[in-house]
Image (spheres, rainbow, N blue to C red):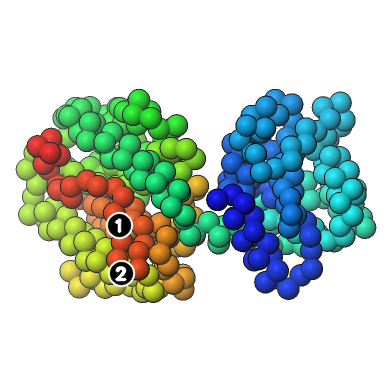
Amino acid sequence: MIEQRTKKLWEEIEKSGKELSLFLVTNPKNVFYLSGFTGEGILLSTPGKNYLITDSRYTEQANQEAKNCQIITQNSKMRDAQTETIRELVNQLGTKVIGYEPESLQVSSYLKYISLMKEMEFYPLHELIEKMRMLKDSAEIEVMKKSAQIATDSFRQTMSFLKEGISELAIAAQLNYNMRINGAKKEAFDLIVTSGERGIFIHGRPTEKKINQNELIIIDFGCIYEMYHSDCTRSVLLGTPSQEQKKIFEVIKQTQIETLGKVKAGQKCCDLDRFARDLIGESGYGSYFSHSLGHGVGLDIHEMPYLSPYDQTVLKPGMVVTIEPGIYIPHIGGVRIEDTVVVTEDGCQILTQLPKELTVSNYLDE
């Protein structure tokens, strides 16, 4: 798989129209994508070979993980050893133009490179690998299925812990713990747990606020398994919901279900966003849906494509995205339901298999 990714990278570089034979990869996720290496280092890619530069702490790890690369251990006795090692390697390869990732290359490093290698031209190639990463291969999808399963199984376990009087922080801590003992490397992001009036904070962090009866609770969670992220949100309630709470929940539930039914290859991201936004608008809650419909998921929790009003990307089989409409009303709270799905030719496969029910008891009965 990794060899195919390197081949694809150089096919994309050729399409740029710039003649170059060396590409500097500095984004750690992209280094992993092209090498399998999970430690600290950078990658120099050529059409025929990849060179992984790291330090002595990671040499053995690199030899085990990055079998398609030539491993170069930088000289720890040299000042700014990584930069010097790159300069020496570039001189050996005899190239005159180096492509680089402008989104991840630090300005300080860039200034060092152009100072030490004045004869070289540094050419930016924007989001080249990120665009490749939008299409997941079968191995990636299998890992993401496992990541989603760990997260959703852990959520079910956490529901029995959810009681009146415990804090948002305690819920997040218990869910984090469950994900780790179930095999996750760690949580995919700082988990979101907001309750009651705090539910309007779309990316609100959990606090010491205690959970009360009859208030909406948003739990946005996910984990990392073998470098790949999962992402899911459920909104629940202890006790008996009010008529307005039930109405808001049903609007979001039906919007999410109907939008999932529209996800398939050939759909534009912006069109899906508009479809969901129109449904919520027809219910009278349009002004309370204040974020985009979803985003890509993979080696990053938020990656291309983005299901927003501005993203013209056409979905293709193998893309993995979230569908997460929400309503957030001051003094009442919020509801969001989110699933991660794999796009197929004629639909999508939902990875985050959980009920979509308002009361906690529905999860306990599963």
In the image, taking residue 111 as reference, residue 296 lies left or right, namely left
Q: Nearer the viewer, residue 259 or 11?
A: 11
Percent position (x, y) of residue 269? 40, 69
Instruction: Quadrant for residue 289, please give it.
Output: bottom left
Neighbour class for label 2 at 10 Å: few (<14), some, many (≥20)? few
Percent position (x, y) of residue 221? 34, 41
Q: Where is mark 1, residue-wise?
A: 349
- Looking at the image, residue 22 lies above or below residue 108: below
Q: Disc count in the image?
A: 2
Residue 280 visible within the image: no
In the image, taking residue 63 as reference, residue 285 lies left or right, namely left
Percent position (x, y) of residue 69? 70, 42
Q: Nearer the viewer, residue 353 or 300?
A: 353
Neighbour class for label 1 at 10 Å: few (<14), some, many (≥20)? some
SS at circle 2: loop
Residue positioned 39% across, 38% down in the render: 223
Residue positioned 55% across, 62% down in the render: 131
- Three-letter amino acid code at disc 2? Asp
In the image, taking residue 25 as reference, residue 170 lies left or right, namely left
Q: Nearer the viewer, residue 165 or 331?
A: 165
Q: Nearer the viewer, residue 336 or 17?
A: 17
Residue positioned 83% across, 35% down in the render: 80
SS at circle 1: strand
Percent position (x, y) of residue 171? 28, 31
- Three-letter amino acid code at disc 1? Gln
Q: Where is mark 2, residue-wise?
A: 346
